[in-house]
Image (spheres, coloured by chain):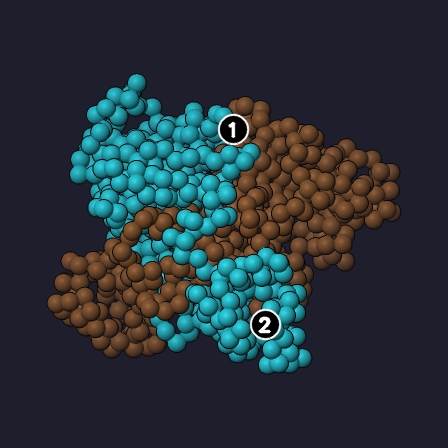
Amino acid sequence: MNKPLDDITLVERVSMQCPTGVRLAVALAGRLAADLGARVVKIEPAGGDPVRRMPPLVDGHSALFAFLNAGKCSMVLEEDQDLPPDLHADALLTDTLSPEQVSARVRVEVSMLGNTAPANAAASEFTVLALGGLLNLVGDPDREPLRLGGHQAAYAGGLSAFTGLMGALCTDTPEVVQVSLLETAVWLNWKNIASAAVGGNAPSRAGRASDWPIIRCADGWVALVYQDRDWLKLLDLLEQDPRLTDPALSSMAVRSARAEEIASVAEEHLSRLTRHQIREAALARKLPLGPVWEPQELLEDEHCLARGFFDRMVLGGGVTTPLPTLPALWNGKRHLPGVVPSVFSNTARQQEVQA
Amino acid sequence: MSGPLAGCRVLDLGIITAGAATSALLADLGAEVIKIESPTYADPFREWKANAQERDDGLRAYFRFTNRNKEGISIDLKQPQGRTAFLDLAACSNIVIENFRRGVLDQLGIGYRVLHATRPRIILASLSSQGEDGPDAGYVSFGTTLEAMGGLAWHTGYSGGPPTTSGRVLNYPDQVVAIFAAGMVLAAWRQGRRTGEGVHLDLSQRELTSFLVGEQFAASTTAPARAGNADGFHALQECFRTADGHWLAVSATEDQLKALPAPSGSEQGAAKALQSWIENRRGDEVEALLQARGVAAALVRDGSGTLADRGHYWHWALQSLACDAPVKGFPFQMQRQPLLIHKDAPRIGEDTAQVLRRVAGYSEEQIAALMRSGAISCGTSADANTST
């Protein structure tokens, strides 16, 4: 099977002072393109991309770097060095601080806050979530707002960079794609923005009193998710508890106002069931309850195994670890990730790239 | 229409967010997107209110945000004639987007095999909760379900507290999948133009949710499952209360901490010192003071606060229609061929007759017969409504 981007060469190059969030976004976009068959040349300084030293580490090797850079080739160039003249790039993934050293038809520029923010405005993924209104939505109402786990601000920006890149590659004219982590974050938060734009109350985090809280079960946690039409099925699973058969609770608005009370009663019942039992019950009743799986459990999850979602990657020095594959199957087939590039093997790789 | 997808026709079977938002992004990139509803079933987003204060006049904000730039037709796919009309449109289209429950497309007799037989070059993008196959394929899920089952909830939460999700308003997995799916469809469209081949894309939202915490699946990491706002990169990252009751989000490196007004030996000491320095100052003042020292600091905005920054920190994510109504904008922008909003969202079946005529070449008699049988319905446009 020919891969969709096997005719494309992509250069990934950011400046030394590039913020980490932008670095991760650029790398994620490049990883997606590499999975689809693009030849992705990652330019690193002699000391290597700083992400190579970032957590999580497995026996000293960065799983973060491996996840974001599998399938690329690494080329060592310092900031003032030009690309080899015979390396033809169709597209460049970069930050907004790099000098325009690489000529390519498509240029994708990623920044934290866009190009109208003051040039020296400091920003992190965390402050991007604060500015975008996402932080305000997560956590308990009487405690500090919470970030989403992992690198969601950077990765969502990376998805934007990838999709913008694909859009530009569908044309045959020069194009500059502008991506800002904040702009993407605001776009993701459109329901909150819509709510503010039509007037009225802007939603805020509700913790355990939210419509779909996370509650305890026998061996962990479960997200108590159900729709209006699921209420009777949920009551059945909760053994028709008399505290919930109150006719007033047949109204969604009343349930929403008394969500915390419902959560506590549901918790009493679901505390007797394991997450696997809850999964079975949810499948049988078509209820959208969400057992909370740990990442390490998902590696052995029968659904993930059946779909071949994880692949082992070599991090370097003989260390291997399972990591997720591209979540897009083409006619039922997975595009498996390539090898994680080592920074020291660049001379050979350089020749290979030029060949 | 101009843009990278000029000349590309998309049949949009998406409802609520995931599928419909993917098609909306394709429309922004220049595709002709035809949203398909049924005389017996409308997109539930037509009824959802953004909040209790939303006025009851015309299109609802959620629906309008997700379906601007599309035409709207109404076909009953459960009726044989309706199905035939859909396949006649598919024969003249390039892409079909759907996010039904698994099995529904085949039950309707318009699964990938049928579409492929109708038009071999067609791209079918199936955005499902859990993927096309596997033991959980039939698991009914919403975004919160997928955050729980995909590993994101496990890593979100206060230190020592329970797993946490993005919640019903943000519904994170439904939003990110639209950007990802649009990118995959673009890659498939480009490949199709080179090879003449179509493809069925199987896009699992649960897998995407897991992919977006991909590095967390690495073996034997010793980091705690949930660490509140700490990220392992910054020496200190937390929200602090200000004197006027706001929360200030701060990310500081070790060097920055040492240079702060109230330095202290340990990280905990630094957090305490910073807390007491911040809690005696107004939010806007302390945000500016920290920014001036090069420290990433931002007051936590609610929706109204973020909206107030429009035109200052961000620009494209919200757009306005000619009538001034706000609609969803773009997650990125292109300089030469910019993403554009060119029309409001359609009323149900607003374009049924004109699309069947123009795209499938149906005669007035055929359209009238389909109307009589109830296989299609024709609505009126928003313009027609407002002018009467």
Badge 2 amino acid: Leu
Q: Residue furthest left?
A: B265
Compared to B210, does A317 lie above or below?
above
In which chain is the residue bearing label 1? B
**Local crowd at mark 2 within 10 Å, few (<14), some, or many (≥20)?**
some
Q: Is residue A121 visible?
A: no
**Residue at x 52% of width, y 28% of height:** B191
Q: Secondary structure at mark 1?
A: helix
**Residue at x 67% of width, y 79% of height:** A247
Chain B image colour: brown
Badge 1 amino acid: Gln
**Residue at x 84% of width, y 38% of height:** B366
Q: Nearer the viewer, residue A26 or A245?
A: A245
Task: Report the Cα–Cα distance between label 1 and label 2.
Answer: 51 Å
Residue under label 1: B191
Q: Label 2 near label 1: C-beta < 8 Å?
A: no
Q: Are marks 1 and 2 on the same chain?
A: no
Is residue B42 found left or right of A151 in the rendered image?
right
Q: Position of residue B112 (x, y in %)?
A: 64, 36
**Residue at x 77% of width, y 58% of height:** B388
Q: Is residue A306 visible?
A: yes
Q: Nearer the viewer, residue A264 or B308?
A: A264
Q: Residue furthest top?
A: A355
Chain A image colour: cyan
Q: Position of residue B350 (x, y in %)?
A: 73, 49
In which chain is the residue bearing label 2? A
Residue under label 2: A238
Q: Secondary structure at mark 2?
A: loop
- Image quarter where the C terminus of chain A lies is top left
Is residue A46 found left or right of B48 in the rendered image?
left
Compared to B143, does B188 lie above or below?
above
Q: Position of residue A98 (x, y in %)?
A: 27, 39
